[in-house]
Image (spheres, grey):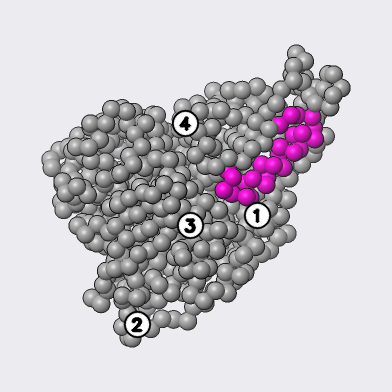
Amino acid sequence: MRRALALVIAAVLLLAIAAPVSSPVVTHAQGGGLYANIFDYIHREPWMKTGGTLRVPLMGEAGTLNPFTFTTSWEAEIIDLVYDTLVILTPDLKFAGRLAKEWSVSPDGKVWTFKLFENATWHDGKPVTAEDVAFTYNLMARIGNKTRWASVAVLIDHAEAVDRYTVKIYLKKPYAPFLLRLAERIYIVPKHIWEGIENILKFKNEHPIGSGPFIFVEHKPQQYYKLKANPRYYLGRPLIDEIIFPIISNPEAMLLAFERGEVDVMTWSIPYASVPKVKKIKDVRLHAVTEFGARFMYFNCKRWPMNLTKFRQAVHHLINLTYVVNVIYQGYALPGSLGRLPPTLKPWANPNLPPKEKKYPFSLEAAKKLLDELGIKDVNGDGWRETPDGKPFTLAIYSPSYDPLRVRWGEIIANNLKKVGIRVKYQPLEWTTLVNKLMSRDFDMLVIGGIGDLDPDILYDLFHSKGGWNIGKCSFPELDKLLEQQRFTVDLEKRKEIVWKIQEILAEKVPLLNAVHQQFVFAYRVDKFEGWVVGPFMGPDNWFSFMNVYSLEINKPPKTTPKPTPTTPKTTPTTPKTTPKPSPTTPTTPKTTPKVTVTATAPGRTVTVTKTVEKTVTVTAAGAPGATVTTTLVKTVTVEKGIPPTMMGVIALVIVVVIVGAVALALRRR
């Protein structure tokens, strides 16, 4: 995610997660503070007409459209439009109701009550009820430990429908990030369909039926997926008629299609060498997002010698992350943290951790020394090392063929392993084959990416022995204990201490090799469609965009709402000082976009709030000198007359901190 400023940012985020424990009922119309009214983010004008086909490319075929077992961002792209969750995180990091119009939590933090919108229906016409929500959460309580939600599903005790539109979800323990990590993530499925499925974990769900803003139409293998607008969507019909998702599995080919106007958005990062060229294209806007996950490599600790800490440390000596950042990623990345959390995710990222190049500097000799200490030596003089009992061995390393950047640094590791005497089979694979290797643990080392979160409990997912994303099964008893302790510790300082200790252990045990925290540079066209929504943690291909984009061929905005002259402020990507490089940011967008920004004047003690006034905010990010992000956030704030000036200053500071915190943390992908 993007640059965090300081401890106060995390305090705000923790409050945003933990405060509901003692708060009254939150309704969908409640604005300001931690929550938002979803309708403030769905922009409609009397002159807007529906119509048009949006073309959004996908990097590959969807291996499944099962909302419990999907693994890729392109599978999530479709699932997120077909299904709904209870709540949604807005572009400015607030919780808004999606299926739920209001919610509350018991004083002990163990029972969450949600009231649903009464007019929600499934795509087959049947009503969405509390029975569907209860069924979904009870399903997660029963089999969730085998799904992508394994780490949090184990916290669910059961759910019950109180009445037709009220559901209670019971947790085994109070869990502060419930809204963020369960209610905002778990998609609700129709009970009348899914209760008849025998093997849910293997169900591909090739023709999904949900309650979301778009209805699944068809899939032409290796060609495209098609969705159409849901005319009965309870939050309002999308303005476009349909979305076609052509499959373009190469970033260069995707960019070419984008330049020709054959697709309307880049859903993968623009190849960095092409950024200057794309910036010059008329009616194209750029938007940069730094991931809060990482591009990393799994070690399969169920196999020798990956189960040996010294071997994993030796591999860390075989790659120069400074070179990877500066040359392969051309400065559009941060070096991977030994503690897994991006160093800018403060206060959770441990600032005392040394960078990888200091603790495990690139050195073939250092790697050789560790291998010798393990007894992995060349005993027969053929130039290749054998096992301690003298047997030859070969290690298999895989990477995703669609991403040339990961292919390159994966190849560097493989080549350097050969240089120190380890036989290696290195093979980039297409995504479906790679996922099969990953999930069956048929690998020695495997290059992958993503898996991050705003909350440090993501470390539980990745490193606990029962963590859903601990695919390599590198687990340690002392780490398990701390990972369990941190997820139920509400006190900010105490939890921070635990999370920092966890990262110290990770830096020694190195269960993963974190190469980089990548900055993705997206692009979208405004010659055919307007209404795109972007945020500091989300690219243009998101739920809010697809709800709001409208065809310029069909819609002609009133002349009273002129388009401002686009500007593209220069920024610097999140890189070390040694590699300053321009990073595109989002230019100002027309007032017809669904962005609501606050403009306030304060004569005396009165603040006048102007709604739907566009303002582009440029924030300098901490942790990367010169790095800035330009974005337009959605916000509605009301400050009553009579608040003392000092209190006004505090409120203003909190708003700025939340904005910068949002800019500092980059959510959901890949």
Please provide percent x and percent y for residue 201.
36, 31
| Callout 3 secondary element | loop
Q: What residue type is labelled 3?
A: Thr
| Callout 4 secondary element | loop
* As drawn, 150 above or below 630: above
Q: Which residue lies at the image location 63% right of the left edge and 67% below the top edge?
A: 582
Specify the label residue 561 is tagged with. Answer: 2
Q: Which residue lies at the image location 73% right of the left edge and 45% below the top edge?
A: 320
Rounded to the nearest whole Å, what is the CA distance between mark 1 and mark 3?
Answer: 18 Å
- N-terminal label among 3 and 4: 3
Q: Which residue lies at the image location 79% right of the left edge and 24% below the top edge?
A: 385
* As drawn, 92 above or below 14: below
Q: Which amino acid does label 2 sit on?
A: Thr
Label tally: 4
Q: Nearer the viewer, mark 1 or mark 4?
A: 1
- In which image quadrant can residue 658 be found? bottom left
Rounded to the nearest whole Å, what is the CA distance between mark 2 and mark 3?
Answer: 29 Å
Rounded to the nearest whole Å, what is the CA distance between mark 1 and mark 2?
Answer: 40 Å
Specify the label residue 329 is tagged with. Answer: 1
Q: What residue type is labelled 1?
A: Tyr
Residue that carries the numbered disc 4 in the rendered image: 467
Instruction: Specify start and end residues of the magenta stretch as a single range.
Output: 399-424
| Callout 2 secondary element | loop
Please provide percent x and percent y for residue 72.
46, 44
Residue that carries the numbered disc 3 in the rendered image: 267
Please provide percent x and percent y for residue 611.
32, 73
Q: Which residue lies at the image location 50% right of the left edge and 33% below the top edge?
A: 436
Quick check: marks 3 and 4 in contact, CB under 8 Å? Answer: no
Q: Nearer the viewer, mark 3 or mark 4?
A: 3
Q: What residue type is labelled 4?
A: Gly
Q: Bin the neighbour count of mark 2 within 10 Å (Cα to Cα): few under 14, some 14-19, many 20 and up.
A: few
